[in-house]
Image (cartoon, rainbow, N blue to C red):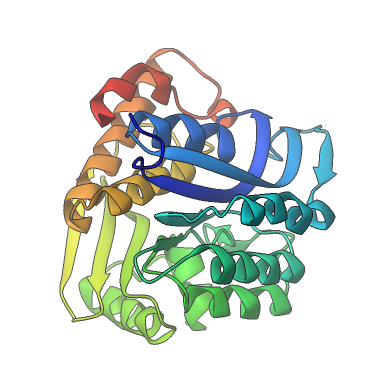
Amino acid sequence: MNQKRQKRIAVINDFSGFGRCSLTVSIPIISAMGIQCCAIPTAVFSNHTGYDDYFFDDYTDKMKYYYSKWEKLGLRFDGIYTGFLGSERQVDIVRDFISRFSDADTRIIVDPVMGDDGRTYATLTHGLCRRLGALVRHSDIITPNLTEACILTGIPYSENLTDVSSLLKIAGKLVSLGSNNIVITGINQGNDISNFIYTRNGNYEMYSMPLSGSRRAGTGDVFASVIAADAVNGVLLHDSVKKAAAFVAKAITASDEMNIPPQDGICFELFMKELF
């Protein structure tokens, strides 16, 4: 394939050498879907922070020097996908990157990694939350879980916010932040797991499927990587959500059957051919 004609996505996330998350998930998945994946590391980890011990190297001071070389190459991207950002400064760097490397046709996908199960991550400060809300303004698609959707909108989290009426209220507030398409992910509804899709024109859909197994690290990164690649490939969002959810579910089931430890993520590699 001619590289000049091949679509490109810049993925801004941390690099975890072990544990199947962040860039080590996005690079193979986006590549398998026919798109050149161009990585910008925000930090380097030996393994993700779900393990008791890990090596960590912050990349914040190097990020602008890193992509300044891309600017000299005249690169532009069909998609820009952001994952975990650990500080206000990193969010500002990402906003600068978007202004330099995108145009009217670039799809911006923001996965606002902030917390889960009603709890925020240790790195989330009030200032970082505010900056991430500003980053949402640049996005075409955001993929928060229910906790993150509540944080962004200022709605107190509750496990009971899973009915359509509550989700419509949350999604409407998310749209008011500036994004065009909302996917609230991983909504626990008893024996089902659901994803709620909402668009700026008020259309919505709840896509549900049976719970497939244990909770595992990295599933959000797998899900959002499929969404990002499909967005650049022109796939309709509701079709993309169904594909991503089914892909994650199948990999969770296989990982449970193989007795893979939950912190080791999901064995998505076994099903990559289904993404072509």
Quadrant of the snapshot with the C terminus: top left
Quadrant of the snapshot with the N terminus: top left
Image position, residue 134 (x, y; %): 56, 80
Tell me if I can see residue 12 in this picture: yes
Image position, residue 235 (x, y; %): 20, 51
Q: Residue at x 41, y 32 (%)?
A: 31
Q: Nearer the viewer, residue 233 or 155?
A: 233
Tell me if I can see residue 156 in this picture: no
Q: How many marks?
A: 0
Image position, residue 269 (x, y; %): 41, 20
Q: Is residue 130 left or right of residue 167?
A: right
Q: Residue at x 43, y 68 (%)?
A: 103
Q: Residue at x 54, y 37 (%)?
A: 217
Q: Is residue 203 left or right of residue 144?
A: left
In the displayed structure, would residue 32 be above or below residue 183?
Answer: above
Q: Nearer the viewer, residue 167 or 81?
A: 81
* Residue 114 figure quarter: bottom right
